[in-house]
Amino acid sequence: MGADDALKYAAALLKSRTQWTGDSIAGSDECNGHELELAAIDDTVTEIRRLTAQFGDPRRYSDGRVVESR
């Protein structure tokens, strides 16, 4: 796997994990006061996904396969 595909995989994994943890934190009673932290995490995911766009479609590996499936 090339570095570009590894970055695309890592970005997809980061997005998935941060969505899950963000939803969990936001839905808990302890979320009060953590909106800035959750926004910072979301901003980081966005920045990393922008980096992947430098290597073509961030949703597809260099050989055309999709990075994420549902």
Image (cartoon, rainbow, N blue to C red):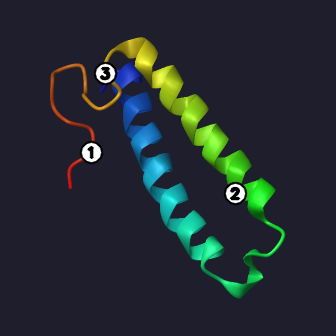
Taking the view exactly as shown, the residue that stands out farthest to the left is 64
Q: How many marks?
A: 3
The label number, if any, that marks residue 23 in the structure image: none
| Disc 2 secondary structure class | helix
Categorize mark 1 by other alpha carbons within 10 Å: few (<14), some (14-19), many (20+).
some
Residue wearing tag 2: 38
Measuring 49% from the left and 66% from the top, which residue is drawn there? 20
Dividing the picture into quarters, in which one does residue 28 lie?
A: bottom right
Left or right, 63 with reference to 35? left
Q: In terms of sequence position, does the residue under pointer 2 or pointer 1 come before the other?
A: 2
Residue wearing tag 1: 68
Foreground mark, 2 or 1, reads 2
Name which residue type carries label 2: Leu
Categorize mark 2 by other alpha carbons within 10 Å: few (<14), some (14-19), many (20+).
some
Left or right, 46 with reference to 8? right
Measuring 41% from the left and 22% from the top, which residue is drawn there? 3
Taking the view exactly as shown, the residue that stands out farthest to the right is 33
Q: Mark 3 and 2 residues: CB-CB less than 8 Å, in contact?
A: no
Measuring 80% from the left and 75% from the top, which residue is drawn there? 32
The label number, if any, that marks residue 57 in the structure image: 3
Pick the front one: 30 or 55: 30
Name which residue type carries label 3: Asp
Q: CA distance from mark 2 to mark 1?
A: 23 Å
Residue 11 vs 62, above or below: the answer is below
- The x and y percentages for residue 40 are 73, 47
Measuring 31% from the left and 21% from the top, which residue is drawn there? 57
Pick the front one: 2 or 34: 34
